[in-house]
Structures are given as C-alpha cells and as structure tokens.
Amino acid sequence: MAGKSGREISATPKGGITKILSWEGALILVFIAVIILGKSISPNYTLNNVLREMQKYLPEIFMMFGMGFILVLGDIDISVGSIVCLCATLTCIAANAGVPFILAALLCILIGTCCGMLNGFLATKFTELPTMIITLGTQIIFRGIAEMSLGSGGSVSYKNSKDIAVLAKKIGPFPISFFLVIILGVVMITVLSRTTFGRKLYAIGSNKTASYYAGIKVQRTRFLCYTILGTLAGLCALFLLSALYGANTTTGQGFEMEVIAMCVFGGIATTGGKGNLIGGLIAAFIIVCLRIALGQINMNTQLILVIIGAMLIVSVLIPQIKNALMPKKQKV
Amino acid sequence: MAEDIILELQGITKIFPGVRALNNVHFQLRRGEVHALMGENGAGKSTFIKVITGVHAPEEGHIYFNGEEVHFKSTLDASALGIAAVYQHPTSYDDLTVTENIFIGHEIIKNGIIQWRQMNKEAEALLARLHANFKVTEEMGALSVAQQQMVEIAKALSTNAKIIILDEPTAALTANESEELYQIVDQLKAEGVSIIFISHRMEDMYRLAQRVTVFRDSQYIGTYDVDQITEAELIKAMVGREISDMFPKPEVTPGKEIFRLENLSRTGYFKDICMNVRAGEIVGLTGLVGAGRTEVMEAACGITKANSGKVFLDGKELRIKQPVDAMKAGLILLPEDRRTQGLIQTWGLGRNVTLPIQEELAHRGFNDEKEERQLAKKYLEDVDTKAVSIFDLASTLSGGNQQKVVVAKALAQKSMKVVIMDEPTKGVDVGAKAEIYSIMGDLALQGYGIVLISSEMPETLGMCDRIYVMCKGRITGCLDRSEATQEKILELAMEQSQKEV
C-alpha cells in the first residue's frame, strides 16, 4: 500500500488531561465555594442537615444522567417531569388498591420505561419533527393522564407509608438515594466515556448523517436513550414518593428544566456531541447544595431560582467570553 | 499604457498569526478579460480573493484600480468600485424570492417604501440578459445550484460590477449547466466585464480564460497565456513537481465476479439496474448529475431501500436492511459529500477512521483506545495523509486529505471486498487527485473491486476498465476501456434527455 512519502503521523495524545479537567476543575472550585458560602451564612449547614435536606433533590439527579445521554445525542426530552408525576400517581393508586409494595415499585419503574419508549418511538418514527415539540406533546399527555387519574381532589397519598419509607432509610448519615446516585453515576459516566455505546452517542450528536453512513444504527440508539431516561424517571418517581408519601398535580413540575440545567451547567451542550456526565454530576451537587444553603437562611424560593438561572446563563457564556479574549489562530 | 489594465496588485503580502498566507504575489487583470487563477488548495487563492474584495487588508503591497492606487477598508469600498464575488456555495437566502436575493442590501427604496414592482422589473431584465428561464418570484431554495449561481451573477450585475470573481463555479454543475455558464461568461466578457475565474478543472480554464496566473504555497509562480502553455507545464507550475502519470491505471487481469446488481429498482429514482464488478477491476458509473448514479449505490449499500432487485457479493445474495449489513458483508461506500456524510468534522482523524470498527476492537463493549490509535495511525499513513497527528480535527484538512481519511476509514474495515467511490476527487486539487488515483490503482492491484462514480470525463476514461453510463435512472450502455471515448459516453448519457428536451 502507498505511504510513499514515509510521512509519520503522531498517535500520542497531547496532554489532553489539562483540557479535560479545565471545566470540571472549575466546577469543583465552584462546589467548594458553595460549601464555604453555606457554612458562613448558615449555622445549620452541617453534613447531616445537608444530607437530610438533599434527599428530596437526589432523585432528580438520577434523571440528569439519562438527560445527559439525550443531550449528547443532540436531542432533548422535556416530558420527564410529567413522567415522574404519572408514575408517582399511578403507583400510589395501585398501592392503595392493595398491590404489594415490591410490585408497585416495579410498576412505577415500568410505567416510566413505557413512557420513555413512547417518546423514543415518536422521536424515531417522525425524525423530521424536532424532539422538543414531540416531548412537549407527551409532556402534556402524560400530565393529563395523571390528572385524570387523580380525579377531582387533585392529589393522592400513599396510605401504607411504612413500606415506602424503606427507600428513605439511611446508612450512616447517607440516604439510600445518595448511594444510588453514586452507583448510577459510576455506571453512566463509564458507559458514556469508555464504551462503544457512548462513542456512538457522541458520533450521532456530532453528525447524524455521517454516523448513519458509518453503519451506526442511529434510530435504535436514540430509542434506547429515551427508554433509559424513562426508566430513570420512574426510579426518580419511586424515591420521590418515599420522601413525599403521595402525589398531586404539581408533582415533578419543572423537573425537566432543572435536570437540563444541571447538564448544561456541567458542560453538556444542547447542540449535541459535547460534554460529559462528570461535569453534570458536579454541577448537580453545586445546584442542590446552593439551594439548601439559601433555603436555610430562608431566602425566598423565587429569588433562589433567579440566582440559579443567572448562574446557568453565565456558565454557558464563559466559553464565548474565553473565545473573545483569546481568539484562536485564524484559519487561512 | 498599451494594455488596458483595470486591476493590478503588486507585492501583496498577507500575514495571519503564525502563517504567511500570501507572500509577495502579483496579479494583473485586463479589461474584458477572463483570467484564471489556479493553484492547489492552500496555495492562497482564497486569501487573495479576500484581499481583492476588501475582506482582508494586506500587510504589504499596492492595489491599483484603473491605474490609481486604492486602499480597501472594507468590502463596501471594493463593491463601490464594482468588484463582486460569486462563491462556490451560493450565499443566498433560500426562503426569499429571486428578486429579494438580487437586491438584498441595496433595495430600491422611495420615501421609505420598497419599490417591489421596479425591483421585479429590473431583476427580470437582469435574468433576461443572462438568458435565465426561471421567474423572479420563485423562491431561491426551489432553484438548482446552477440557477442559484445565475442569481448570484445577476446580483453582482445589479451593483454594476466591473470585475466579477467566480470561485469554483462549475464544481457543482453538470456538463450542460457548465456549458450554459461558459456562455454567460463569454457574454459578460463581450460586454466588457472582467472576470477572475478560480477552478480546479482544466477544461474550464481552456474553454474560458485567455490568461492564467498560478499560485503555489502562498507564492506567485507566474502568469501565462493559456494558448501557450501545455497542460503538463501548468500542472508542474501548480504542484511544483512533474506528475509523470496522472492516471496510474495498473494492468490487472480481472478475477472472478465479486459484485453484481440484478434488476435493482427504486421507484422515482432508478429502474432495472444490472451491473457487475470483478476482482481487481475498476468499473466506472457515469452519467449526468441527477441520472441516479449515487442513488443506485446508496440503495445497494442499504443507505436507502430498493423496491426490488438483488445485490450479490461473492456470489451470495445480500440481505441488507441498513448500512451496517452491507459494511459487514464487505461492501463499502465512500459517500459523495465528505463534509456531511463521510466524516465527523469536529472529531479527530483517528476517531473518524475507527468509528465503523470500534465494536470489533472493543472488549465487552469497552473501547480499546490504544489499539484504535495504532490502527488509525497505520491506515492514515498508508494513504499518506498530510496531517501532524491523528488528533488533528477533520475540519482542518483540505478536501484531498479529507478524502484520504475517508479511504483510510474504508481500509480499516477488514471485511472490505468492494469499494464504491462517489466523486472521490470533487473539489480536490491536482496533486491530491493524482495521489487518490494512485491509491485506487493500488487497491485494484490488491484485488478489491472498485466502483467509481464520477462526472469527470478524464478520470473516468483514465482509470476505468469498463464504464457503465446512466441516463434518467437507467443504464444506457456499458463501454469497454478500449472503445470508450468522451463522445460515446456523452451520447449514452444524453440519449433520452435529448429526446425529451
């Protein structure tokens, strides 16, 4: 074969570690800053207190991992909040009707999975539609079904709360859901960064057409990711029930945006093909810990949202500011 | 001055951080002249055009317009003097009408109201001057590339351009469309407009230009009268070395048949396609753009679905549901559009090369990055890619080198038996073209079957053992290397279209 000039092409990665670490490194610094801030403004900002309050936020982080996959694909799913509501509602109703806890728990996850499959089916069947619109539609549908099931009262409580409280147990100061976040984190981060499946997600998110020509089963991969996110939404609903002992029409409202915010703050681009879940995980803890700190000094909830929104915008602006300050070599 | 010089540039040097993009180059344009500007990719042609149109201010050198020195502060200064550029990919607004596109930025406005009727009238007059056969009220997106180019030229004329720069205008055109463009250029020339013409196609230059200026490695090489320089001399000026044999077609005795299509049909695209390829054979598939060549091969490779017909590889019928099935079987397609279909531009070269084989190399689903790097390096070196590292981004490579990466990506697939190259030298400069032909020759020698889809007559005639010609979705003939001529191919390619037109 050719190679006539004998030109050699280097195959050694060039100090990639500093490049990879830069955004995540910055996030860790922000995280430390948030902890210091919390300690200085609130005397109650202790490990035990923070972990206890964290319990109601942790289930959202499950979904962050799935949403990370979807965003890397260049897709989006804004129906997950409604999926959580639907899962929680139906699970409560089933459990109250006498379905044993284990089965009700499995049902919760199964319903989430089915919702995810429906999203995936629609997104891969009607590829010309933007997924934002498809999942906007299912968002309304899922919540609609949940509200119909809730009836006129608009809420349902989990009667046999002893069962579900098992999931709220702690090992030392750490709630079970915290361990689940860590385990899921290790698995999902590894899948995205080290496996052929993860590589396919980046390929599809970077260039769908070229990925298809390169033999990747683009639609099957997308379907799978929507399904995974649905499953995680079901899991989220289950653990949410263990903290709230019930569901109502507002359960899970706004979760989709909070989860997307965690991903974007963590450096995952909504345009696809960029970012990783390590950033997303750190960002999730930053947002949660900041909320807890500001909540402890009784800051107005709405004001907290304003602060988090501002942080998000600044974080996506940083790369642009960096580019403006340090223009890259102009291409000729 | 004896000669009527409209534009002259002397000693132009343009420096970008770290690169000397133009180094002391000269250029002279006569009034009413078609002047070709040639050189390999990266020779500095684009930068030079940007200097003429006022996009870049040169660090050194002088620009004279009608004998007077001028300094362009912005593109507005250049267009005020009547300099307009028409780029390879028309920079138009697809959803706007032809009139709107022509007058964008200089609409005719009276008392704050856009004068649509007057603009439509003037647009019509401009199109009539170019003998265009579409309406000014049509949406730009509904036009063919050739028609869009006409609109761009009309836009240039609407600003009263004295100098029009055409940047690779024929790259995306069929033979017929190119001929129409030639006639427009001839007419503009007769009207006294000066034209700078950039193209990789020798035919364009011979047909149109009186003089040709060659750049190489940011340097000025020379200006020649077209009728006084031979093709070999010109190529040497561009490439810097002699290319002894542009088409190194090896003498291969074809082996047994390895690829066959039987009555392949896809409604609305092509019908009853039968063809075969033997081991070591290079088989051409040509015809006018739109004849259905790409569509046939995409269906054979599972990119789209054929309605009926069979695909055989090594005597076995293939059941292809999706691209990966064809690839696993050994049927590899190098798609026409490197930028969107062939490569992920934002990825490094290495990852691009190993994308189709990552699963074979992986252990239990985990990527074997080390092995991937080694293989990527090997195959990229095999095809002689001009790159520093396998981590270079695909987007930083020239067209020819991107094509080599696409070839490396195919070679990395050990299953490969038949390789289908769709316009592998489109937009590729002369030096890299020769290298791609040489790779094709090597592949044939190694016993692969090769299908070459091409619109370029010289490469089809130069490289192929047999040539299938398509017209309007059907194969109209198959010519042997010994009997194939340009005339015969064109006759077969236009057989039916002439009847219909």
Image (tube, grey):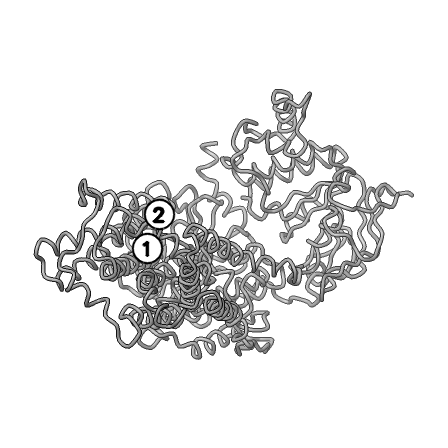
**Kind of residue at disc 2:** Thr
| Alpha carbon distance from label 2 to label 1 | 9 Å
Task: Give residue B263's position: percent from left, percent from top.
Answer: 30, 49
Of residues A139 and A179, the one drawn nearer to the viewer in this rendering: A179
Residue hosting label 2: A127
> Same chain, marks 2 and 1?
yes
Determine the residue positioned at 83% across, 57% down: B60
Task: Give residue B329's position: percent from left, percent from top.
Answer: 32, 65
Determine the residue positioned at 65% across, 66% down: B243
Q: In which quarter of the image is the C terminus of chain A?
A: bottom right
Q: Which mark is residue B3?
A: none
For numbered disc 2, what is the local secondary structure?
A: loop
**Kind of residue at disc 1:** Gln
Give the chain of mark 2.
Answer: A
Q: Is residue A308 above or below residue B30?
A: below
Determine the residue positioned at 69% across, 68% down: B241
- What is the quadrant of residue A181 in the picture? bottom left
Q: Which mark is residue A219?
A: 1
